[in-house]
Image (cartoon, coloured by chain):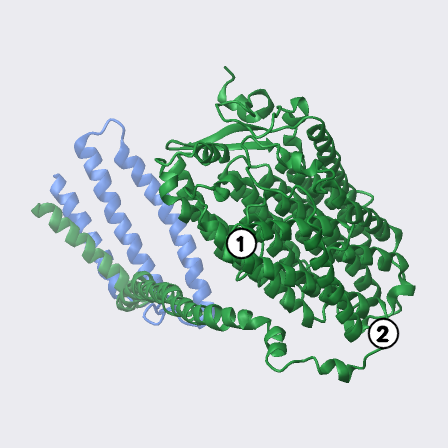
Amino acid sequence: MTIAQFVILGTALFSIGLYGVITRRNAVLVLASVEVMLAAVNINLVAFDVYLADQLYAGQIFTLFIIAVAAAEVGIGLAIILMIFRNRHDADVDELDLMRY
Amino acid sequence: MVPAFVSTLLPILAFVAEEGGEGGHEAAVQVGNGGALAQWAWLIVVVPLVVPFLIVFFGKKLPFKGWELAVGTMGFIGAYGTALLLANASSPIATEFTLEVGRIGSFAIEWGWVVDGLSIMMYFLVGVVGFFVFVYAKGYMEGDIRFTWFFAAFTLFAGGMLVLVSAPNLIQLIVGWEMVGLASYLLIGHYWEDYANVDAGNKAFMTNKVADAALFIGAIIMALSVGSFSFADMLAVVTAQDASSPLATFGFWAGLMLFIGAMGKSAQFPFHVWLPDAMAGPTPVSALMHAATMVTAGVYLLGRVFPFYLDPAGLFGGQVRVIIMVIGGITLLFMGLLAFVQDDIKKVLAYSTVSQLGYMVAAMGAGAYTAGLFHLFTHAFFKSLLFLGAGSVIHAVHSNNMSDMGGLRKRMPYTYATFVIGTLALIGLFPFAGFWSKDEIIASLYEVGIEGSGTGWFVFALAVAGSFVTAFYMGRAVFLTFFGEYKGHAQPHESSRVMTYPLIGLAAFAALAGLLNMPGIATPFTSWLAARRFPMGDVHAQSINWGLVGLVTAMLALGVFLAYRIFFPDRVTQAERDRFEIPVLYPLLRHKYYIDDLYMDGIVRPTMGPLAGAVLWVDMWIVDGIVNGAGVVARGLAKLVRWFDNRGVDGIFNGAAAATGGSGSVLRLFFTGKVQQYAALSFAGVVLLAVLFIIF
């Protein structure tokens, strides 16, 4: 197992997540794609932490932080989407241009 | 040595006494220095200069509103003058004290006080006549809105005259001369609410200024010739008969110029025009002005420098003397004639004063120092008496015009009695004051004629005719005022005691003052006046010339008789009086020989018109030009500033706002509100940064 394999996996997952974020029209799927991107980042962090044999395990601790923050983010994000859906009976991000100028 | 500043502060510590008889000049009489009485005589001058300020500042708070300060001052001067007069009578005094206050090149500017026969007479006169007039003025000015101010100016008037008569040099004389002029201007214009009175004040001031210019020129010629402004230095040159002195070269012009100055103040033809108009002032002012102060200044000046004019050898001012005599002669007769046609009682008296001043000046011209000044002395008493009497009448009938008077003999007995005494003194009836002084003048002119001078005879004839004229106009005034029917509207009654007592006091002087100089009998006045540091050298009659007395008495009897025939009201109707309006003569007199018109149309208006035009032009084009120019410049500047403000300052702010707005309107196009677009763009940004990071 080389570091390159993990980096390629992270890159692939990040690219898939990014594609999902940009192209999906359903807000829930966009949120899910963001989670995929975060997961790619986590893989990257853990891989480099092990590879560099960090005495402080900073990469792994950061991973735990990201997982916690991502959980909170999903909670708030789903709540916002739920409220939007309740108000508009729709969760299509293309239609959600309330913050337009 | 006393430091200079101490000597300035305390003149008495550092005075320089120049005692009579010293310095190699032989005095006419043995004179002394007068002791402490003369040393402290500076009080006479200083007190009336300080008191006006006290009156102005504190007068209104005093129980008599400042009058008590004024009358106290005059009482003090009168008492001090009397003391000096008595001291001079017991042993002659002639001394002067000087104090250098400045220096122009080699000319010392000195302040000082002269104590000799002539100045003592003037101190006495100003003090005594002034005291009576000031007491009287309290009654006359009662209720005047500027009562306090009046007494301040009135005291200053007397103070100016005292500066003048105490002067040991021409500079101080000029200072006093101008102070008198200023105070008279203030007093003549006292009722300045009426524009005519302001005009009269201006006329007096301007006419005097013309003559004053000559006085200045004369003083400068005199000072440059002698090397000093001091009278003593000048008279020393004259007494030494120093023909090599520059004064001998310029003596005629210096003398003529000084005399022209004297003509202005003493209202001699052709400068007489201001004096009758000066009647616009309150009557007490006229009384003092015509008696002791102001008009006597010119005669006093002639007396002060008398040896210069007498000058028998003809080295100095001797040639001017004929001019002086003729001017005096013309004035005494022709100005007296003008009194014939005046209806205003004060103007009758005013022309009478001019005429009597003519007598004094003619006497000076004739070389009769004692006679001229003796007439000044007696005239002061009876003329102030007549003015105060006229004021009492005016006060009672509320009119100056004799056509509003008449029949006041019974209603105003004190005024009547004293006025008649004054009249008899003025026309020169034996033995009243005017008889002695005027007859001595006529006798002096007679002497000049006897010596073979045709001009002397001419002036003598004028003087004799003048006594007829005097009798006629005074008779007319008395008959129109006090006899016949009362023609006025007010209810006349005798004035209060504060006014009648001064009349009685002055009447006593008017009746008796002449006894001080009875030629051949008792002549104390002659020796008083002779107390000078230089011999005056005048001739005075040794005895009474009864032939002349008879002639003059006949003339005045004729005058009174004619006045009686024409003006004694119950005898003659107005139609008959009108017959005396002789075609050419009457209009001539009525218009004052057209001299006033000549001055007005010939000098004042032609000068005033173009002058006013020039001033208007300067005002319109230069003064207004400057002001308007400044306005235009300011407006241009304001426009520039406004432009800068609008375009510059506002431009910066508006430009910044427009730039912000413009860029905002472009940038907001990126604000689509589509979340995925934002995400794509931010990722593109990250990629861009990464690429840049890798490249650089």
Instruction: Estimate how packed mark 2 is, as few (under 14), some (14 to 19) or many (20 or more) residues with alpha carbons within 10 Å.
Output: few
Note the chain letter of the green one.
B
Residue B395 vs B75, above or below: the answer is: below
Q: Position of residue B90 (x, y in %)?
A: 72, 27
Out of B478 and B272, give the one closest to the viewer: B478
Q: For the residue labelled by badge 2, is the local secondary structure a helix, a strand or a loop?
A: loop
The residue lying at 61 percent from left, 25 percent from top is B30
Q: Mark 1 falls within which chain?
A: B
Residue B228 vs B14, above or below: the answer is: below
- Please tell me the numbered disc located at residue B489: 2
Q: Mark 2 falls within which chain?
A: B
Q: Quick one: quadrant of the C terminus of chain B?
A: top left
Out of B599 and B180, give the one closest to the viewer: B599
Kind of residue at disc 2:
His
Residue placed farthest to the left in the image? B695
Residue B200 vs B235, above or below: the answer is: below
Would you name the residue on which mark 1 appears? B325
Residue B270 vs B231, above or below: the answer is: below
Kind of residue at disc 1:
Met
Out of B507 and B467, give the one closest to the viewer: B467
Is label 1 or label 2 in front? 1
Chain A visual colour: blue
Image quadrant assignment for residue B278: bottom right
Q: What distance separates the C-alpha of mark 1 from that of mark 2?
A: 45 Å
Q: Position of residue B610 (x, y in %)?
A: 41, 71
